[in-house]
Amino acid sequence: MKKLALLLACCCLTMLTSGSEAQSIGAARFIGLWKLVRIEVHQPDGKITPDPDLGPHALGYIYYDSTGHMGVQLMNPDRPKWKSDDQPTSDEAMTTVAGFEAYSGTYDVHPAEGFVIHHTQLSLDPNQVGKDRKRKFELNGDQLRLTPPPFKTVSGVTVEETLVWERVP
């Protein structure tokens, strides 16, 4: 009976640790700095367009570290500049947040299911703090594709967006 209990305990322990190993092996492929290549907005008619807020020349970086932390910043480089370097008008100050996205927190990789979850702890958007952001992922060599769930645009059209990243050496 003791042998059977010991065997069951070993099996349970193996199952528990094998899942965390798979998690860490999956996460290891994410670790590093990634530069945005492009954002593809897949329209219902099949067209691929740029992100409406970040524009066709969007810039960005995302990082994943070995401690389980991540961060991302995205920017529309074509945002209008302020007339004064340090005294923006109210309208000009709004351009600071319009066309810029940033958040950070922790992350979990689920390689078998093909998704990563970003657990938002800091965000430019205060309504996103404390929320999880689930992304489908494809890792192919030095390219990472992240696809959030489909969403409705301001005009009410449901689209899917994919962010394409390239590993920074």
Image: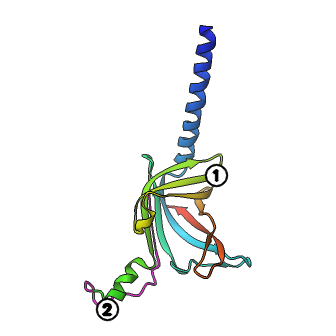
Q: Residue furthest top?
A: 1
| Residue 136: x %, y % from top left | 62, 58
Q: Amino acid at mark 1?
A: Gly
Give the number of the disc on residue 102. none
What residue is shown with label 1? 114
The one of 140 and 18 positioned closer to us in this rendering:
18
* Residue 83 circle label: 2
Taking the image as shown, residue 149 lies to the left or right of residue 89, namely: right
Identify the secondary structure beneath mark 1. Answer: loop
- Location of residue 140 with respect to 7 vertically, above or below: below
Residue 74: in magenta span: yes
Label 2: element kind:
loop
In the displayed structure, does residue 119 sit left or right of residue 25? Answer: left
Please say if 71 is above or below 154: above
Residue at 53% across / 42% down in the picture?
24
Numbered range of the magenta stretch: 70-87
Q: Residue at x 45, y 48 (%)?
A: 68
Q: Quadrant of the N terminus?
A: top right
Task: Name which residue lies at 41% across and 87% down.
Answer: 80
> Which one is earlier in the sequence, the residue at label 2 or at label 1?
2
In the foreground, 131 or 112:
131
Q: Amino acid at mark 2?
A: Lys
